[in-house]
Structure formats: structure tokens, C-alpha cells
Image (cartoon, helix red, strand yellow):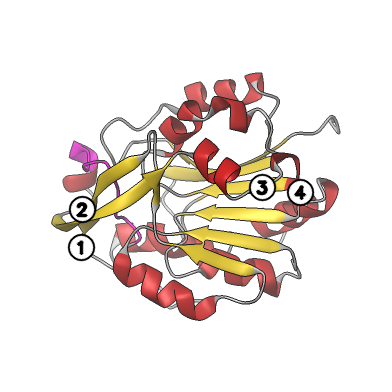
Amino acid sequence: MLEPLRHPIRTLARVRTALHHSENGYSLNQDLQRVLQDRAISTVVDIGAHHGLFGQHLRASGYTGKILSIEPTSAAFEVLQGKLDADWSAERLAVSTEEGTVELKIFDGDGQLNSLLPASELGSGTWEMHQVGKEEVRALTLQGLVQQRGLDPERTLVKIDAQGLDFAILQASASTVDAIAALLIEVPMFGLYEGAAAPGVMIDWLRARGLNAVGFYPVHDHPRPLIPVEFDGLFARSEDLG
């Protein structure tokens, strides 16, 4: 586990490295393993891979299938390339609502907060997110990515960490969302970026497409604030209800 960080937004950004460990209950790691096994996942698409920590946790947890990591930031992508293996590939591009060239906003810090969206008043004020640069990067839609890479959506888990653009990415590729087996996505309670979706709208939209919630996991380490600013939401296509 990483050493505790004092700045709140840095704490927010680092927690996925531990996959929300829980000693006396369900954790994201436990539920993720169930989804990978129950849905016979053969490919994980990691959108917003940063330095590849999610892929590393998949490997450490015993997942041996294919991983496709997508990371738009040049510095982070360089680090990511050092983590790959024979069945783990990476591409430097953004996944967005349309194809073409997009402007990636670079915020201060280690790159985990970089986004195609500007920071909201909450993000720039309370959370002290300040843009320090920008990069132009090629973009594909989720549908374009799945089709061009020849992925089987029925055996694919998509993880999206697109810093506020997550739901818009899904909406732009609704037919692909209708087919994927599982989804891990940020569910913001309070938008750190302009235009971030309301949580209820996102959850209802996914349920209407057959993706039901497996669990929600605070994106904070312990001790955490009483009210988390975001959750990671794990969704799967399954009739195993109860």
C-alpha cells in the first residue's frame, strides 16, 4: 500500500491501487474476481490506465486474460509501457464521444486527474485542481475501439476512469454498452469536472441496458470523509439476483 498522502485530491486519486480493501465485508477486489469468473471475461479494456496499476492488480489477482490499456497522457503512457506483458497491450489515445483529435487538459499532480473536461468550481476551488498544460491526442469512441480491435463485447469488462467524461463516453456508444458483459466506472456524487453526470441518471441508464450494480466502493482510503466525493461502481450483466 502506498504511503498516506495529505492533499485530499491526491488521496482520492490513489485509492484504486488498493482496490478498496475490506477486512470484514465485500471489497471491489473480491467482487471484481467474481465478475471476471462468472462472466468468463477474456478481455479487460482499461480506459484511463495511468501507470497501469489496475492491470497490475488484475495480474496479481490471478487474471491471465488479455488487457488493453488506454492512456492519453504522454508521461503516464511512457511509464505504462514498462508494465506490459505478452497478453497486456497499451495504446496512447483518448476514448471520447467522437473520433478525431482532442485537447487533454493537464492538471497539477501525477497525471491521474487529467481530463478532456475543465475542472468544476468544486474541483478548482475546494479540491485545488489547477490546469498547468495541455496535450493534443487522438481519440476514438468506445464503439470504435471495440470494433477496430476486434473485441468480443460479451466477454469483455470495460473499466472507465475518464475524469468526468465517463457517462458521456457510454452514451455515445450505447449499442456497445448494450453488449458488454461488465463495467467498472466512476460514479461521481459531486462533480469535480464541468458536465459530470448525476449518479442516479447514470445508474438508471445502465440498468435499462441490462447492467445491474454489483457494488459501489468509496474512492477514498481510510480514514475517509463521511461523504465520499465519488464511488467506483461495478456493474454486470447477470440474472443472478438476490
Q: What is the quadrant of residue 76 in the picture?
A: bottom left
| Mark 2 touches mark 3? (CB < 8 Å) | no
- The answer to which image quadrant residue 67 occupies is bottom right
Marks 1/3 in contact by CB < 8 Å: the verdict is no
Residue 182, image x, y percentages: 68, 41
Q: Earlier in the sequence, mark 2 or mark 4?
A: 4
- Determine whether the residue tagged by mark 3 lies in a helix, strand or loop: loop
Report x, y in % for residue 145. Answer: 52, 45
Q: Is residue 219 above or below residue 183?
A: below
Main SS of residues in magenta: loop
Q: Is residue 160 left or right of residue 179?
A: left
- For residue 151, the mark is 3
Who comes first in sequence, dot 2 or dot 3?
2
Q: Quadrant of residue 122?
A: top left
Q: Judge left or right: residue 60 versus residue 226.
A: right
Residue drawn at 69 percent across, 32 percent down:
179
146 is higher (above) or lower (below) than 45: above
Q: Which mark is residue 108?
A: 1
At label 3, which amino acid type do we have? Answer: Leu
N-terminal of the pair, mark 4 or mark 1, is: 4
Q: Residues within 10 Å of mark 1 (few under 14, many from 20)?
A: some
Identify residue for label 2: 129
Q: CA distance from mark 1 to mark 2?
A: 7 Å
Q: Secondary structure at mark 1?
A: loop
The magenta span reads: 112-122
Instruction: Please say whether residue 232 is visible from this viewpoint.
Output: no
The residue pinned by badge 4 equals 35
Image quarter hosting the C terminus: top right
Q: Earlier in the sequence, mark 1 or mark 3?
A: 1
Give, as a three-letter code, the residue at label 1: Asp
Of the residues tagged 2 and 4, which is closer to the observer? 4
Could you give the CA–CA distance between mark 2 and mark 3, rounded to whole angstroms? 36 Å
